Each structure stands twice: as structure tokens, then as C-alpha cells.
Amino acid sequence: MLKVENLTKTFKQGESNITAVSKIGFSIKDGQFVSIIGKSGSGKSTLLSLLGTLEKPSSGSIVIDGEDVTKMSEHELTNYRCKSIGFVFQSYNLIPNLTAIENVMLPLEFAGLGKGKRFERAKQLLDQVEIVEDKQTRRPTRLSGGEQQRVAIARALANKPKLILADEPTGNLDSQTGKKIFDLLHNLARSENTTIVAVTHDLSIAGKTDKVFKITDGKLKA
């Protein structure tokens, strides 16, 4: 369960204060896939950064499985992000000189898993997102955009996170591939019992998620 209460983020801009996120509150059950929509500058990316503990809120709380992450120290947050939050980006953010399977193994190495178990888990995840065996040893430049995003999703799932945050995961893909990626995320939310929150500009895809939140001027409307 992800529970957000009175979440506010204010930035200093010159002598003025800009409120990017204002008193937002919502709850999402485990295994739900939720989309956030809104115009550019509405606060979508700031909200995602707050949920991912990349930004500290000015006030309010974010509780994930009973833990208030806003009260954690920087050291605790680093460990928490590694083990409990997965990230999927529009530009994939794969390491170009590593193969697909090595990219997925990387967060498992940070988590202290042995090499054999890292390889086994990474292979299982790549199979799950339908990256065939001969492509698992290819570097990102030898994969299509859709395949790279599948590898990025496998990497996000590596440490069995409680929460996956996806920032425009289909933004660089054609509409047909984008739909397949969203369907994949939806199925994974169910099968892995992982909460997924995705920012998207594609209203047709967003409408197929379990919940849609619209953010306007930093305020959320369900």
C-alpha cells in the first residue's frame, strides 16, 4: 500500500516561492497500476521524484508498506531506493557498454547477491519480459527501442521492489510498441503484486490503468 498525505513541495525561485506540488493525498493498493496525467509544468515529474525519494517534500508524508520514507535519513533512503523502488525512464537509461543481462544484474550486485543468483534472476526476468535468449547478450545499441524498454523494466523489477515509478515509459516508442509496453507493465503489476505509478501524456493508454490522477497546477484530481 502506498499512502500519500498532504504532500507539498515548494521551491525557492529568486525572492519568490513556487509550489510545484500542493497538499496532494491519495492511496494505492498493492498490485495496482496508476497513471498520472497533466500538462507540461503541472507538477507530474516533481510528484514522481517525491514518490521515488529523489526529492524531499516541504511537508506531508509518503508511507510505503507502513514505512514513512519522508522520515528516513539520506543513508537509509539510498538503501531503500536500491531495494524497494524501481525506476523506468523514457530514455531507458541502460548502460551502453553492458549487455542486456548485465544491465539487469547490476542492481542485484548493489544489493549484494552472488554472481550465480544474479545471473539466474536476470535471465528469469528477461524471459518474463520476452527478451529472447540470443538478445540477452546484446548491448543496448543492438536492440530496438521497445526491447530496450523491456530490459529497463526487467532491471526495475530486479530486487522485487514494492513500487515501480515510470516516467513517460512509452514516450520514445511508436503507438503500437507503446501499447505493448503498457500491457506488459499492467500484467507485471498483477503477477509481481507491485504498485506501479506511471506519468504519461497518452490519454488512450492512461485510460486503461486502474486509476488515473490528473494533476493541474500542483493539485491532484482523481
Image: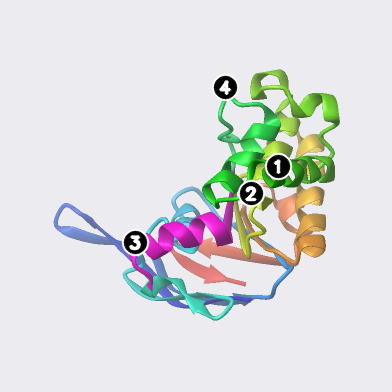
Q: CA distance from mark 3 to mark 2?
A: 21 Å
Name the amino acid type tagged 1: Gly
Q: Which residue is identified by label 1?
A: 116
Q: Which residue is identified by label 4?
A: 97
In this view of the protein, which residue sits in the foreground, 14 or 183? Answer: 183
Q: CA distance from mark 1 to mark 2?
A: 19 Å
First of labels 4, 3 by sequence position: 3
Name the amino acid type tagged 2: Ala
First of labels 4, 2 by sequence position: 4
Q: Quadrant of the N terminus?
A: bottom right
Element type at mark 1: helix
Q: CA distance from mark 4 to mark 3?
A: 30 Å
| Relative height, residue 175 to residue 198 (above, below) | above
Residue 118 shows in this picture: yes
Q: Are the two marked residues, 3 and 2, in contact with CB atoms closer than 8 angstroms?
A: no
Q: CA distance from mark 3 to mark 1?
A: 31 Å
First of labels 1, 2 by sequence position: 1
Q: Residues within 10 Å of mark 3 (few under 14, many from 20)?
A: few
Q: Which residue is identified by label 2?
A: 156
Q: Quadrant of the C terminus?
A: bottom right
Residue for point 70% across, 34% down: 101
Element type at mark 4: loop
Q: Position of residue 43 (x, y in %)?
A: 45, 57
The magenta span reads 72-88
Mark seen at residue 74: 3
In this view of the protein, which residue sits in the foreground, 55 or 22? Answer: 55
Name the amino acid type tagged 4: Asn
Q: Is residue 160 magenta?
A: no
